[in-house]
Each structure stands twice: as structure tokens, then as C-alpha cells.
Image: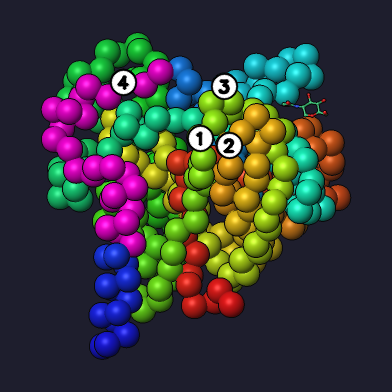
């Protein structure tokens, strides 16, 4: 019982910190209606999806693949999108190594805010209700925002599977619930994120690795923000062939970033067309693929397993 209480108090503490970090959490729907999406966000969504695709490669059923390839493959001429500078291979992880990395600079004050669970649960969350939802949030039918909402609803509209390993959280509480479910009711966990320790206004620059800390955990839950009028996270669990890292890098143009990263050791079952292979110039199964997490992603790891 005591264990349960201490675990919950830890969770509440984390929650509190998280809320402070998020600046403010619950907002009235009227304010949420004003949140607009720009195309920048849609572009990042393409990246998030490439990362999601990486992490879902065990169960190759991302049928929306072609759709997001369209978003991300602006580069027909072998030019790499700046934001694809997040992939690397494990041998790059050495103190002193210099490499170009893209860390997005989203202004958290304009990011969609979490709704309280009871509020979020009152709003339908299915592609079928899109017309109602567009009306509800005063979003015009053919706008990029509408397209983004449709996309998010479709991505989140998967059938619950046995041993559920993915979940779309429409509130902070349901995000915690999923983490709790994945790690077990009495486990403690913490969140890894990529954060800018000191500011820099240049998203893509050469960074020098100054610290590498490997975190060995049996499993982890990665959560990626999805474009929506309020905060929605696509979360899924990661088991087995992964290594997580906390890395500190220093930009040549200034800016220190504490970054979360993951390496997928077995890439043999991945789609050979995956952009990571092109970026790294490796082939499926020949090399692990690692990537930094964008600053607005959350990686939950159990605390107990950390040495
Ligand atoms: C990083 O440094 C290399 C070598 O000096 C240079 O060729 C490259 O353009 C730099 N990349 C960025 C993004 O500044």
C-alpha cells in the first residue's frame, strides 16, 4: 500500500513538474478554438510519422505510409530535408563527435494545450465525426488544419489489439494511464525529453556531442504530439531491441541541447524505402538506426530499471 502511495505521489510530482513545464494546462475550449496550425506544423508531422513508422515497423500496418511520404518527400533531387538530420548510427555516439542535427524550435506557448480528461471525453474522437468536429472548433472544411485533424483522427482510429501497445491520449490523465498500464500499476517512471538548455535560434547546425548517457530499460513508451486543436499524443510501447540515450550536445552557433535519442538495433524487417536508410546510406538489417527525439516528444521509461 505504501508502495502504491509513494508511486502515485511520484506520478503526481512528475505531473506537477510537467504542468509547470507546459506553462499551463487546462484551457477553456473557447481558447482552444483560437489555436491555429501553420504549415510548419504539418511538415513536422511528416517527420513525426517517419519516426512513428520506424517504431511501428514490427507490425507493418501503417497503411497511411504513402500519404505521409507525400508530405515528407519534397526532396526529389536527393536533397535531404533539413529536419531529417535527426538520424544517426550508434558509432556516432562518441564524445567529441560533430554532426549536423535539426532540433525544431516550436514555441510552446502556441502549442495545443491539454484538456482535462472529463472535458476531452465529451468530445467525439473518430474520423466519422469530422464534420461535427470541424464545426465545433470553427475550422473550415478544406483548410490545412482540417486536413491535419482528419489525419490525426485516422492515425488514432486503430482497433484495440490484444496486448495493446499503442494508444492515442487525448488528455494528460489518459497519457499517465497508458504509461501506468504499460509499466504495471506499482512501477515508477520518468519522462525523457529533448530540451534546449540554452537558446539558439538556428534549428539546423553542427553540434558537438559532450555527454552520452545510455539508459537501459526493458521497455519504454514513446509519445508523439499529433496536430489537433488540443493536445493529443500518439503513444506506443517499445520493447526489446532498443537502447535509449540522454545526450548533451553543443551547437557551433550556440545553444546547448539535452537530447533524448533511441537506437533500433534490428532493422531487418523495415521497409527498405524508409527515409532513414537513405539519410544514413545503410540497408535494412545492415545497421541499427538511431534518432533524436524532437523537443515536443515524450519518452517514458521505468525508473526502477535505471542503475
Ligand atoms: C557542418 O560542418 C561541415 C564541415 O565543416 C560543413 O561542411 C557543413 O556544412 C556544416 N553543416 C552545417 C549544417 O552547418
Q: Looking at the picture, how far across and down is residue 47, in whole percent?
A: 57, 32
Examine the rendering and report whether any part of residue 76 can be seen: yes
**Side of 114 relative to 49 (left or right):** left
Q: Count neighbours of disc 2 (C-alpha within 10 A) and say few if under 14, some if 14 to 19, many if 20 or more.
A: some
* Residue pictured at 55% horizontal, 67% vertical: 219
Mark 2–mark 1 distance (CA, rounded to whole Å): 5 Å
- For ligand 1, tell me if the residue under mark 1 lies within 8 Å: no
Q: Are marks 3 and 4 in contact (CB under 8 Å)?
A: no
- At label 1, counting other C-alpha atoms closer than 10 Å, the crowd grade (few under 14, some 14-19, many 20 or more) is few
Question: In the shown orientation, is residue 123 left or right of residue 15?
Answer: left
Boundaries of the magenta span: 14-38
Q: Are marks 2 and 4 in contact (CB under 8 Å)?
A: no
How busy is the neighbourhood of tag 4: few (under 14 within 10 Å), some, or many (20 plus)? Answer: some
> x, y percentage for residue 41?
45, 25
Q: Nearer the viewer, mark 1 or mark 3?
A: 1
- Nearest to the observer: residue 307 or residue 166: 307
Q: Quadrant of the C terminus?
A: bottom right
* Mark 4 lies on residue: 36
Q: CA distance from mark 4 to mark 1?
A: 25 Å
Which of the two labelled residues, at mark 3 and mark 4, occupies the earlier sequence position?
A: 4
Q: Which residue is mark 2?
A: 255
Between residue 88 and residue 254, name the one nearer to us: 254
Mark before the other along the chain sequence, 2 or 4: 4
Q: CA distance from mark 2 to mark 4?
A: 28 Å
Q: Secondary structure at mark 3?
A: helix
Amino acid at each position: 500500500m505504501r508502495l502504491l502511495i509513494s508511486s502515485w505521489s511520484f506520478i503526481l510530482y512528475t505531473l506537477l513538474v510537467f504542468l509547470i513545464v507546459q506553462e499551463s494546462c487546462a484551457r477553456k475550449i473557447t481558447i482552444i478554438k483560437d489555436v491555429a496550425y501553420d504549415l510548419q506544423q504539418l511538415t513536422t508531422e511528416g517527420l513525426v510519422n517517419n519516426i512513428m513508422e520506424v517504431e511501428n515497423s514490427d507490425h507493418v500496418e501503417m497503411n497511411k505510409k504513402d500519404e505521409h511520404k507525400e508530405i515528407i518527400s519534397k526532396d526529389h533531387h536527393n536533397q535531404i530535408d533539413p529536419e531529417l538530420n535527426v538520424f544517426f548510427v550508434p558509432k556516432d555516439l562518441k564524445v567529441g563527435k560533430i554532426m549536423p542535427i535539426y532540433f525544431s524550435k516550436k514555441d510552446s506557448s502556441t502549442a495545443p494545450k491539454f484538456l482535462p480528461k472529463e472535458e476531452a471525453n465529451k468530445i467525439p474522437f473518430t474520423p466519422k465525426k469530422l464534420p461535427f468536429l470541424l464545426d465545433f472548433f470553427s475550422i473550415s472544411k478544406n483548410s490545412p488544419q482540417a486536413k491535419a485533424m482528419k489525419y490525426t483522427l485516422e492515425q488514432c482510429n486503430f482497433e484495440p489489439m490484444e496486448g495493446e501497445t499503442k494508444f492515442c491520449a487525448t488528455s494528460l490523465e489518459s497519457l499517465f494511464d497508458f504509461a501506468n498500464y504499460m509499466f504495471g500499476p506499482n512501477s515508477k517512471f520518468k519522462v525523457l525529453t529533448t530540451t534546449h538548455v540554452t537558446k539558439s535560434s538556428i534549428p539546423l547546425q553542427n553540434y558537438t556531442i559532450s555527454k552520452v548517457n545510455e539508459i537501459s530499460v526493458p521497455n519504454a513508451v514513446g509519445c508523439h504530439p499529433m496536430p489537433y486543436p488540443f493536445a493529443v499524443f500518439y503513444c506506443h510501447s517499445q520493447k526489446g531491441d532498443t537502447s535509449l540515450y540522454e545526450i548533451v550536445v553543443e551547437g557551433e552557433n550556440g545553444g546547448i541541447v539535452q537530447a533524448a535519442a533511441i537506437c533500433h538495433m534490428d532493422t531487418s524487417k523495415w521497409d527498405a524505402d524508409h527515409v532513414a536508410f537513405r539519410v544514413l546510406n545503410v540497408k535494412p538489417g545492415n545497421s541499427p538506426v538511431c534518432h533524436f527525439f524532437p523537443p515536443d516528444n515524450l519518452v517514458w521509461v521505468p525508473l526502477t530499471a535505471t542503475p
